[in-house]
Structure formats: C-alpha cells, structure tokens
Amino acid sequence: MLKLENVASYYGESLAIDQINLEVKEGNFHGIIGKNGMGKSTLLKTIMGLMDKTDGSINLAGKDISKLKTNDRAIEGLGYVPQGRGIMPQFTIEENMVVGTFARQKNNMESVNEDFEFTLKLFPILKKFWKRRGGDLSGGQQQQLAIARALLTKPKILILDEPTEGIQPNVVEEIENVLIKLNKEFNLTIIIVEQNVQFIKKAANNFSVLERGRIIEGGISSKITSDLVQKYLTI
Amino acid sequence: MMKTNIFKNIFFLYGIFCFLLFLLPLLVDDPFYLNKSSTYICFGLLAVSLSLSWGYTGILNLGNAVFFGLGSYCMAMSLKLKTDAVHTGSGGLPDFMVWNNVTELPWFWEPFYSLSFGIFAGIAVPVILAVILGYFIFGGRASGVYVAIITLAAMIVVYLLIMDQQAYTGGFNGITDLSTLKFGKLEFDAYGASAYNLIVSVMTLVLFLTLIITKSRAGLIFQAIRDDENRVRFLGYNVGVYKTASLCISAGIGGVAGMLYTIVMEFASPTFLSVPLSLSVVIWCAVGGRQSIFGSFIGALIITSGQGLLSESETFLHTWTLIMGLIFILSVLFLPKGLAGIFSRKKK
Amino acid sequence: MEFFVSQFISSLSITSILLMIALGLAIIYGTTGVINMAHGEFVMIGAYTSWFLQTKLGIGLIASIIPIFIITALMGFLIERLIIRHLYNRLLDTILATWGIGVILQQFIRLTVGSELKYLEIPSYMAGSMSLFGQQVSIYRVFIFLFAIAIFILAWFIIFKTKFGMKLRAVTQNKDIASCFGVNSGAVYSATFAFGTGIAALAGAFIAPLKSISPDMGTNYIIDAFMVVVLGGVESLIGTAASSFIIGSTSSFIASFSNDTLAKALVLVIIILILRIKPEGLFTRKIRS
Amino acid sequence: MQNKENNLIQLNSVEVNFDGFKAVNEFNFGVSAGELRCLIGPNGAGKTTVLDIICGKTKSSKGNIIFNGEDITNKEEFIISRKGVGRKFQIPSVFKELTVKENLYVALNSSLSFFNNIIKFFNPLDQKKIDEIAEFVGLKDDLDKQAQFLSHGQTQWLEIALVVLKDPSLILMDEPTAGMTNYETSQTVELFNKLKESHTLIVVEHDMGFVKEISDIVSVMHEGKLLAEGKTKEIENNEKVKEAYLGNKGITNA
C-alpha cells in the first residue's frame, strides 16, 4: 500500500532522515518506535510532504506521490493524525470533522453521512460535545476528534503520530482498541509512531526502529524483545 | 569593528568620500545645480538616520520623516523671526499670523528669536518626541508590525496638527519667505557655495559621529538587538532603553538633516513630514542597504539625484519613480542587504 | 435631541465608509497575516476604474460594480502570485513589498491617466436628499450605508456559511493541518487576497463621488483602514465592524466641535494609547502563546 | 526533599495558567547551590514552562519563586538575569549576522548601561578572555565566522558560551543536546561536568543516556506536576515514572 525507497528529508539545509526504505502492505499495522528526537515524526511529515526538501520516491497504492503537494497527497488517500493532534481551536467538533471531509475523493462522497455515523459510534464522546470548540476540549477528547477527522477522509492508509502521548490511561485504552478494531475488522492499513512499545507489540504486524534518522532494526512485531527495547529505547 | 586594518580603512573611505563632495563647487558653478546637490546630501543624512534605527537596531520606523520635519520647522521659525520688518507686518509678527488675525506672538515662538535656540530645538524637539515614542512602543514591548504602524500614525498626528493649527504653523503652505542664515559676519546664501559647504561639513561631522557610534559597544548591542532581542534581554541589557536611545540618536540626525534642508530650500512645509517622504526614505535605505550607513547614504543620493535630473519631464519622472518602486520590491524580495550587501566585508 | 440625531447619522455615514475600506484589509490581514500597505492604492484603482467605465464607456455606477470587482480582484490575484507568495514567512517584509506595489500602481495611473483630479458625479437618481428621523440626509450617503452593510453581510456569508469560507478559516487557524486535509492553502491565500482587493476597489468606487479622485488619494485611506483593523483585532469580522463604529462615532463627535483634521489626529492618538495596553486589539481573546 | 531554606532556587506551589489550561500546576521544586538537577518528562509536561517562569520569560499566575533568598516572581527578564540567572533556549538563540567574536563580546561586556557603552570600544585586553571561552567551547578557529554559518552543534555551544560568559550562579539549559551527533553529545557531557564545579544547573533533557552521565538528582514532571524526584537509579525503576514517561510498562519482564 505504502512504499518508501531511499527517502531522505531536510529541515532547511540540515539532513533529518536518510536512506529510509519501508513498505506497509495493505491491511497491515506498522509501528515506528525509537527514542525521542530520532526522526520518527520527521518520517511521517516526509510522507505527508511537510518537509522543506525530500529526496527518494514515495509510492501510495501504486501511485508515485513524492512530487505531489501535501493537499494533493491527502486527496490520494492519506489520513493524518499529527503530533499534538492539530485540532482547529475555534472550530466546533462538528466543523473539525467537516474539515476531514475536504480530502474525500469525488467517488465516495455519497457515503459521507454513513461515515459520520460510523465514527461517532467509535467515539461517542464527540457526539456529546458536538457544539463545543476544539480549543476547549481535553487532550483525550482532542485525540479522538483527530482520529475521527482522519477517518472521514476515507483514507487508504491512516497515519498516526504518537496518538497516546500525554493522555490519561483509560482514554489510551479506548484509542488502542479502536485502532486494533479498525485494522482487524475493517482491514484499514495503519502506520503509527508510538512511544508505548507494549501497544506496538500487541497490535502491530511489523515494526521499524529509528535511530538518529535511520531505520536500524525492523521486522515482525514478535521480534520486539526486552533486550531490543533495552538496547534502543531506554539506555 | 574588531580588526584594526578594516577600522582604519572604513574611516579612510568615509574621509575620501567627504573630501570629494567638497570639491563639487569647484567643478560646478551653476547655483541651481549646487542648491539641488545640497538637498540630495540632506536626504542622504535622513537615510543615515533611518539606517541607524532600522538597519542597525531593527526598529522599522515608518514615520522617520517626522524628525526631519520638526527639525526643518524649528529652523524655519528662527529664520522667519530674523526676516526684516517688511515681511513681518506690524510688531514683528510673521505674515501668515497677521492674515489669521493673531494679535501677538504665541509663547512657544518667543525663544526662536535666538538662532542658537532654534538650532538646539531642531535637535531637542525630535529627540523628545523619540523618547515619548520609545516609552510607548518599547515599554509595551510591541511587535515589529505595531512599531511600524504606531510610528507611521505618530507622524501623521504631527502632520495633521501642523496642517490644522494654521494660525501658528502656517498650515498647508508652511512657513515661507525666510531670511538667509547669518552667523555673525558669515552669510549662507542658499544658492551659493557657502550653504553647500556648510551642508557638507555638517554632513561630514554627523557621518563620522554615526560611524563611531556603530563601532562603539552600544553599536554592537544595537545589532545584537536587531538579530535576537530576547537573547540580549537575557544577557541583562535593558532592551527598551537601548531601542529608545537608538531612536533618539536617529531623531537627532533627522532633525539636523531637516534644519539643513530648510536652509537650502528657504521654506518649511508639511510635506517635509508626510507619508510619501517617509516612504521614500524607506526605499532609499532598502535599495542602498539599510545595514550600512554608507549604503543608505549612497542609495538616497542616487535615487534623489535621479529624480532631480528627470524632474523636467513628467513622464521621465514618473517612470523613474516606477522603476525605483520595482527595484525596491526586488531588493525586499531578493536582496535584503541592498546594494551594499553585494560587497559587504563579512564573508562565509 | 436634534443634535444627537444628526450626530448619530453622520457617525453612521463615516462608519459605513470606514467599514467598506477596512473590510478588505481585515480579511487579508486576518487570514494571511499580510499587511497590505497598497490597500489604499486598490481603493484608488477602484475609483479610477469606475471613473473610466462611467466617462469612457458610459456604464453607470451600479452597473459597474461587478466589472470593478473583477478587474481589481484579478490585479490582486496577479500581485499575490508574483510577489506576496514569497513573503509568507517574512511578514514584516510584506509591509515593504506592498508599499512598493502602491508606488508602482500610483505611478502607473499617473503615466496612463495623468495626475490631474478627476470627478465622479453621484448618479442622478441618488443625487437628492431625503428626510430621516426629521433630518435632511443625502440619499447617496444612505445608499453607501446600505451598500456597506450589504458588502459586510456578503463577506460574512462567504466566510461563515460557505465551504470556501470554512477552508479559509481552517487555513487561518493552521495552514499545514488544513493542507493535510486536502485544502490548497496557496489557492486560498490567492483567492483571499483577490477578494480583499476587490472589496477595496468597490469602496473606492463608492467613495469617489464624495471626494475627488487623484493618484495619491489612497494614502489617507490606508491609515484609517489600519486603525480600524488593528483596534478591532483580527479574529473576527464583527470586531472590524465594531471598531469602525467606535472610530466613526468618535471622530464625528470630535469633529462636531472642532474640525475633521483635528478629529483624525485625536482619534489616532487614542488608538495609539489603546494599543499600548492591548496590542492584540479590543475584540480578541487572549490565546496561548 | 532537602530543607527549603538553603536552596539556591525554590519554587513554592507555582501555577502557570494559559487561558484555562494549567501548563504548570501546584509545582514545588527546589535546587541547592552547586547541584546539577535534570528535569525530565513527556512532551507537554511543562518542563520548558518551568524554565520560562524562573527566568521571567513567562508570568506565573500563582505561587512565588525565591532565588538566593530574594523573591524574583514575575520580575523583568533583564533584572532576573542581572541577579545571576542564565538561560539557554531549546532553539539556539544567537546573533546570526554578527561574528562569533562579536557574539561573545556582547555577552562578555560587563557594563550594561547604555551611557557608558556608547563611549566604550573594543578593549584589546578582552581578547584574551574571548580566546579562553572560545577554546572552552571549541570555537577557537571560528572567531571571525558569522554565527549563521556555524553547524547546529556549534551554535548550541556558542549559546552556552554566551550564557557562561555572564558567569551566572544558576544556569537553565533547555535540551542542550537536541540534534547533536554522538561525538558532540559526549563533548557536551565533558563541558557540563566542568561547569558543575562553579555553577548550579537545571537541565531539561530527553536523552536519558546524557542525563545519566551528568545528573546527581533527577526530577520528573508529568502534566504540570512533580511526579517523582531522586537519584537517577531510583527514578529508572520508579513505577509511576515508567508508566508516564519511559512507557515500557515493565516491558523488561515481558
């Protein structure tokens, strides 16, 4: 579904990530782990086209999107849940979700209401505060709104950047279950950057470890052992 | 500023430049052209004043012409009161006051009988306005955009007050028919070499003074404030004081330039502190290179002399200004350091 | 009582003119953060276009609304594409670049149409005056008031009730996130700039008959527009309307016992004082830095 | 927690409220003189905000801050700086267009008032001090280079030099090793151990390896509050800390 071939990207002139080769097959759940500041978010931003400069090719469902601008890439089928959630503070929950529909392709416009119902069933809390402003929501509520919004673009692949960071444990549980359900029951391809290695081990099919801007380890999720964690994550 | 050999040759370069300007009257004796050249030099000084506050300290002062205008009015008031009886109507009152049936000289005109007070006021009044502006802008830590808007608005307030108080300021047509400047036996005829030499000598003095200021520690701190104001604040400097000081020095230079301009133009008018002039000064600095005093001075000379030469024909003048507008935009987009940036000494 | 009514009417008239001028600027500044110092020149372009259409092609004021808007909007679109687009990460420089554009537009008009003053008569059917709450008021000024309200409601409707408006507000809040959801931020910025300049031109066309038209007429509008936007704060159109009213009524009140020039000066001083205490304007919520 | 009195810096139930959102909440925190304290915690825990309120960049809405026995709550930045508080920022803030030498000279200059700086020039005697500090941070041969042309690591060190030149008694460092290579990080460790001798330091950091090398005591922040505090070893095995921050929830025994 998503294929990166020796991709590198830059903040201004300084190299951020380099020689990235990564493939996420359709229906797969791929976890990106690694210490802070190693380029995990940079990798997702590169896929979205938010970096100053990017080399190498990025391929989505057989189509090369590396030349497209961010907004065209989104329309090709990227559902993005940014770090810090990126909720529009002055928009209500409803308006934030409508923003999600901007990237839908023409052919699946009729199923919009159906998708609205579906996402509201996944995250009932959103229905409760329908008219509340994004800026007045708690971290957990914003996170669920961010995921719902990304789902509404009917993406080919859902891209999540640390969705459980700084959120109280019970909501984390809920989000993790929703992601597993979306992947297992609805065959939604997911790529996720996550600090919580336990969740990746449980939910992901395979994973990659990022160190100083390069993928240095990867494979099927059962390969995540305590010494691997010890070596790359805690030190 | 650190290396002694560069130190010397910057001064040397300035010295040669000023010397060359002194030679002009020998090559050219057409009084009209000499008078025109004096005005270009005054504009050069005005550009230097903006270069110090904007180029060196990062204060985008869109109302820089207000200091220039205040300086010119102070000089005009002194010279007006020097004119012989014929012009001043009964009891030495300026003509425009008589027409506006003002009975006796307002209190704030009194001290201007003395020329030296006029000159002192020509610097003091702009500096006082700069201190007030400094309190307003830098006290409240307004951002770059607000500084630009507030300085522009402040100039317009002064402009409107001068236009409105016709009885005391001559309103729209300003203060005209001034006597020529006389210092003891010395007389400075606006169209003669005497006024020109006065202008160039004052310019030389101011140019060197400004150069010294930029080479002083305070000059270095000005540039540090331009680059990263917060870092300077966290090194213990009271940034508000430094910015106000930079604005005051710039005001003083602007006032001097305004006084010289009135001596040469023989009148003072609200257009000396108007938006179009203020805008032109910004253009001279941007094109010439605001971060270099010399660059801004040269930028002003080139553009104003160009306008002067082409002023006979309407179309040439407008095309020239149009081209200047284009060069201004290009320099904002691609050449933030202006012409001076091309051969500045700081390399990779 | 008599005094208050005439006072209120004259302040409404000034408010409507201020609102029309400031609206275009507020929309551009609010969305893109660009400080368009050429805004006055676009008002001037609107006035000259209306004069051209009226005297050369005999098209009436009302009929020329659409053409004026389109011509100037196209001009704004071109300028945004060629120049402004490169400066979105250097907002302070947009002040300089747009001022340069103002100079060019002024000189362009001087070279083509010439610098002598032009006059636009008020259309005959609006020339008279009518009585309103027992006051004789010029029909044209009432028309301007209604037209200003109409433009305001149109702008409000587009921004708050259409899909484009929602995209525009999304881009205002977070440009990157908006593009991550398929919104072409670049196109939104260009459209906003064109829309803002178009409204400025309409303001010019309708204010022109009240005053003369000259290449440098824009200069005195730019400061008024800025004061309205800066005082009103950029978060909401309502803020712009409210601050137009505040400035409109204050200046008409001061003008009633002194004159216009002094009124303008005092209003500027008041605004500078207010900005010292509340730099982000009167109508914005304190947002987390 | 040591007794509060002889702490160089003491924050008492401090709160920072951004329009309803409490970035720092009922925060008590004290560091004694000569100590190097590391402040760690997940993103958005309020670490940087704590540094901001100590040095005066952000105003605290409740509580007070005592530095060297004096109340510096919400004072102006330059006043706090003059009392001996130095601050290094997350995004390095140096004077881009000035040369390294000019950068250092702005910091080295002891007389702060405008009036005596306007009449003073570069004093050749200061050249020695500049060479010394340039040596200390490894920028000896870049003195005439404009700061904008330095590498990311060099810019971080230049900023550290600017702070150290003021010889503050308390130095606040915000993620000094962010974006540094391994070699540069190890250099920074050496640098910090030298600084420890004569300064008190509070370092906000993510790189646990770096924290281990330099820190005596570690404080862990979570959602604006102090979650735990103690020796580096204790913190590592503290359950609450693991769950909130290290995130491997006892993975070690999986």
Image (cartoon, rainbow, N blue to C red):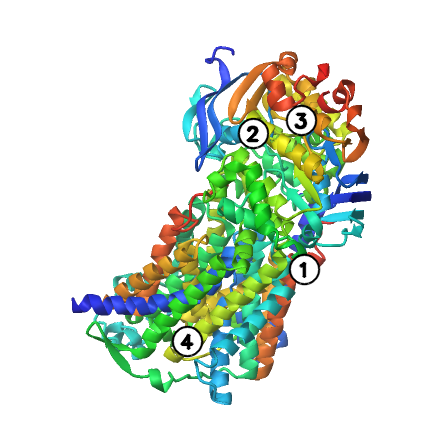
In what element is the residue under mark 2? Answer: helix
Image height of C221 relative to B251, above or below = below
Instruction: Judge depth for marks 1 and 2 and give the one in front.
Output: 2
Which of the chains bears the disc numbered 2? A
Which of the chains bears the disc numbered 3? A
Marks 4,2: beta carbons within 8 A: no
Residue B300 drawn at (x, y percent): 58, 66
Instruction: Judge depth for marks 1 and 3 and give the one in front.
Output: 3
In what element is the residue under mark 4? Answer: helix
Are tags 1 and 2 found on a single chain? no
Identified at 63% across, 65% down, the residue is C81
How far separated are the C-alphas under marks 4 and 2? 58 Å
| Residue occupied by mark 4 | C206
Image quadrant in which you'd find residue A173: top right
Image mark for residue B334 = 1
Q: Amino acid at mark 2?
A: Val
How far separated are the C-alphas under marks 1 and 3? 47 Å
Identified at 73% across, 31% down, the residue is A204
In the image, is B14 to the left or to the right of B110?
right
Q: Amino acid at mark 4?
A: Phe
| Residue occupied by mark 2 | A171
How far separated are the C-alphas under marks 4 and 3? 63 Å
Residue B66 drawn at (x, y percent): 44, 62
In what element is the residue under mark 3? Answer: loop
Residue A14 drawn at (x, y percent): 74, 42
Q: Amino acid at mark 1?
A: Phe
Which of the chains bears the disc numbered 4? C
| Residue occupied by mark 3 | A196
Are tags 1 and 3 found on a single chain? no
In what element is the residue under mark 1? Answer: helix
Q: 10 Å neighbourhood of mark 1: few (<14), some, or many (≥20)?
A: few
